[in-house]
Image: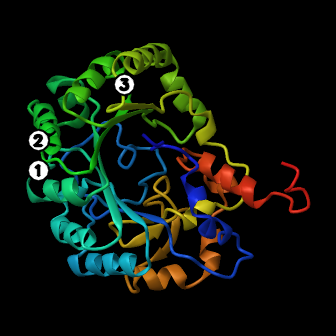
């Protein structure tokens, strides 16, 4: 089994990496796009970073926004024509709530573009589930509560919703196909004592992989670490037990839980990943990344309300260098470590490269 969460994937696309600096004239299409078709969601999670007060992510998000069908199909055709390698559907809202999702998936399934989705799993059934099973690369279901009551408390949904999601996952695996079924567990004070039990239930569904990570409670690194400090030992012990007793060749546990020291402070003045993995929002704006989605002041690259995504992308290379991470990105950033690797490669002194 290969490394699914490695930070070095980008270095399999060296033409793209070498095109990133401002000194390069050629603009290449993004490798991967996060596409947020709707901000409407049928769950209301306590920890949702898009709606949590005080977080910069989602600051300008309207929960009613969604991409009109004609515009969405235009975006999809641009993605195919530009030879974008992959699309991940995510929130904002719940992608499976998007009324034209089936049409979008059918078109992507007929192309060379790989596709995946984050989801709460409540609508993972029917023809859409079949398309993912047969043509999708992965589905990742967000599960945090460990039983009906805790799940209901965290997500403000009926108690029976937990069992419904678990059944959908069982049924999805029965469909067969090559699509990887994953689960994302976000650790908070409600579920921290029950992580091992939750992972055990998840493995029983036939799920292929589970990722465990911390909830984000603040734009400040210290505040996040303070929140998780009392939880580190007990969660760490459960994850160690899970890895030793549950992980095997068919079930991967990826531990991304811990202190967040490497996700906040930025010592660089341009972001390579803007050109690698941008976000198309349900508001028809293109953002630098999913950690700055719906932040019009510091995350906006361009709007596609009056132009196509393809036109906006190739219009000017300067737009990719207007965001200075050292000034405006001292919040959580999933790409921080990858950016450091890329910049370490790009900034190597050419006179000393051979002294490896």
- Tell me where residue 77 appears, x and y as whole percent: 32, 80
Furthest residue in direction right, as rendered: 351
Q: Is residue 246 above or below residue 264?
A: above
Q: Quadrant of the N terminus?
A: top left
Vertical order, 276 against 241 (above or below)? below
User: In this rendering, is residue 308 above or below 272?
Assistant: below
Q: Which residue is mark 1?
A: 125
| The quadrant where residue 163 appears | top left
Report which quarter residue 259 is drawn in.
top right
Q: Nearer the viewer, mark 1 or mark 2?
A: 2
Closer to us: 166 or 207: 207
Check residue 247 in the rendering and tell me which mark sits there, or answer none.
3
For image coordinates 36% across by 16% down, the residue present is 245
Cβ atoms at labels 1 and 2 below 8 Å apart: yes
Q: Which of the marked residues, 2 or 3, is nearer the chain's N terminus? A: 2
From the viewer's side, name the closer residue of 287 and 104: 104
**How would you rate the neighbour count of disc 3 (Cα within 10 Å): few for under 14, some for 14-19, many for 20 or more?**
some
Residue at horizontal 15 percent and vertical 32 percent from the top: 162
| Front of the two marks 3 and 1 | 3
Q: Is residue 249 visible?
A: yes
Q: Which label's residue is closer to the chain start, 3 or 1?
A: 1
User: Image point 48% across, 60% down: which residue?
Assistant: 295
| Closer to us: 101 or 53 | 101
Q: CA distance from mark 1 to mark 2?
A: 8 Å
Relative placement, left or right, of 25 versus 167 is right
Query: Which residue is identified by label 2?
Result: 171
Label 2 to label 3, Cα distance in Å? 22 Å
Q: Of callouts 1 and 2, which one flags the residue occurring earlier in the amino acid sequence?
A: 1
């Amino acid at each position: 089994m290969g490394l699914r969460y490695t930070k070095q994937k980008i270095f399999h696309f060296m033409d793209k990496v070498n095109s990133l600096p401002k000194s390069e004239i050629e603009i290449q299409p993004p490798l991967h796009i996060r596409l947020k078709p709707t901000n409407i969601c049928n769950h209301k999670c306590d920890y949702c970073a898009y709606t949590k007060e005080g977080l910069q992510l989602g600051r300008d998000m309207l929960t009613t926004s969604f991409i009109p069908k004609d515009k969405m199909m235009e975006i999809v055709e641009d993605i195919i024509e530009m030879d974008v390698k992959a699309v991940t559907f995510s929130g904002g809202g719940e992608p499976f709530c998007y009324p034209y999702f089936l049409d979008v998936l059918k078109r992507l399934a007929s192309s060379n573009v790989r596709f995946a989705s984050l989801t709460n799993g409540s609508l993972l059934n029917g023809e859409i589930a079949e398309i993912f099973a047969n043509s999708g690369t992965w589905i990742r279901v967000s599960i945090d509560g460990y039983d009906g009551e805790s799940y209901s408390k965290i997500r403000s949904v009926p108690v029976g919703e937990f069992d419904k999601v678990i059944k959908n996952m069982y049924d999805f695996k029965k469909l067969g196909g090559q699509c990887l079924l994953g689960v994302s567990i976000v650790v908070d004070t409600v579920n921290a004592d029950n992580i091992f039990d939750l992972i055990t239930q998840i493995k029983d569904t036939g799920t292929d992989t589970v990722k465990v990570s911390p909830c984000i409670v603040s734009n400040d690194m210290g505040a996040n670490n303070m929140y998780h400090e009392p939880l580190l030992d007990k969660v760490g012990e459960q994850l160690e037990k899970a890895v030793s007793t549950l992980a095997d060749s068919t079930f991967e546990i990826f531990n991304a839980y811990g202190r967040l020291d490497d996700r906040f402070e930025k010592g660089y003045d341009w972001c390579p990943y803007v050109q690698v993995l941008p976000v198309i929002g349900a508001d028809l704006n293109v953002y630098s990344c999913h950690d700055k989605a719906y932040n019009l002041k510091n995350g906006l690259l361009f709007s596609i309300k009056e132009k196509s995504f393809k036109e906006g992308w190739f219009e000017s290379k300067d737009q990719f260098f207007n965001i200075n991470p050292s000034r405006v990105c001292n919040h959580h950033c999933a790409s921080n470590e990858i950016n450091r690797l890329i910049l370490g490669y790009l900034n190597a002194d050419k006179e000393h490269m051979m002294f490896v």
